[in-house]
Amino acid sequence: MRERPDDQRVVITGMGAYTPIGNSVDGSLAALAAGEHGIRYMPEWDMITDLHCRVGATVDGVDPTALFTRKQRRPMGKVAALAVLAAQQAVAQAGLDEATLRSGRTGVAFGSTSGSGSETEAFSKPLALNLNMKGLESNAYFRLMTHTCAVNVAHFFKVQGRVESTCTACTSSSQAIGAAVEIIRAGAQDVMLAGGAEEMHYTTAVTFDLLMATSARHNADPAATPRPFDRARDGLVIGEGAGAVVLESYGHATKRGADILGEVLGYASNCDGAHLTAPNAHGMQRVMELSLGDAGLAAAAIEYVNAHATGTELGDVAESQATHAIFGGDTPVSSLKGYVGHTLGACGAIELAWTLGALREGWLPPCRNLEAPDPKCAPLDYVRERRETDARVAMTNNFAFGGINTSIIVRAA
């Protein structure tokens, strides 16, 4: 393992999550352990008459009017509200005080796929129909802009350090976490609030439907989809949610007596440079190799791989082949998309929190709906039932349209 000085080691001291199966890391982990899922029929999409996919996974029980003051929620759409709520949980667990948050040595790195779909519609629809500005709000842009999550998290906590926004679809939050790690290693900040969020909107379902990537055979039985790595999979399911982590230099965390949950040992991101949508096993394999190199670890040191696998026909095959090329068939692998669908810009942060949380509790989460692995997929050690473990080191991977790939290696404390 690569030895780094204390101010370049990056540890995790807080985590937060709002998901379709629970509005906290502990709550959603308990639901995960119980095999619960959040996939449901979406009557909200009935007005799109030719949409093939009719199922999704939403976060329920979030009322911004009850959770924030009028001033606080004025610049927030749902996606920003979810981001701030997850960040609140992470900050509370980390025990960060106002002086630390406002010191200028704390920053924010947060992402989402494209900001708020609902706020974009609310602003643009009357403008396009009426061709005038009547009824449009001056604060609308702050709710819909692509960096709404990063800005709202920063302003909610009155952060005065660096603010980074990552908008790279399915790698938005994992790139945010990676950027935060690199910022701390560089000495630019001591603490970073990092993660991502995504809100449900029918335009997202339409986008993936047009790409023929969505699940369409289980509208009458939402529990049966998605099915990562399964031979009967038929596409992904859109989800929403938010995940956040507090990252600190090891030196800063120990100096203030923080409870360390885990350590980020390695991070890498790259681009396939091949195709905007077609999965590329070589690019996937390369980003895992780069992450291992950053951590200074051999593949044998990884005791669990949290796969990105969304349930698409080609994506799962390519990822399994890339994973097998590095780890062979002995390292446990599972995808968590079967529980909450694909939360897009939030998935990297949520899955990192779940991976670290499960390792700390001593178990590996199984692939939900994996009944018969596709013979086209590589022969990996797919986790199909909850598995007790003493594993401490895991890799979690995410892959996005545009050929953007990320890989994070974490060690549980």
Image: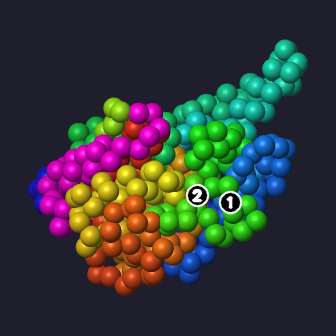
Chief secondary structure of the magenta portion: helix
Quadrant that contains the C terminus: bottom left
Tell me the magenta residue range.
275-303
- Mark drawn on residue 234: 2
Q: Which of 185 and 397 is in front in this view?
A: 397
Residue that sits furthest to the top in the current view: 131
Who's the residue at 76% across and 56% down the image?
42
Give the left or right position of residue 222, taking residue 169 as reference: right
Q: In which quarter of the image is residue 390?
A: bottom left
Report if the CB atoms under discs 2 and 1 are less than 8 Å apart.
Answer: yes
Percent position of residue 250, x then y: 24, 57
Residue type pointed to by label 2: Asp
Secondary element under disc 2, as helix, strand or loop, is: loop
Q: Does the magenta portion include 175?
A: no
The residue that disc 1 covers is 217
Residue type pointed to by label 1: Arg
Percent position of residue 255, x then y: 26, 59
Earlier in the chain: of badge 2 and badge 1, it is 1
Who's the residue at 28% across and 76% down the image?
391
Q: Quadrant of residue 308?
A: bottom left
Q: Nearer the viewer, residue 312 or 104?
A: 312
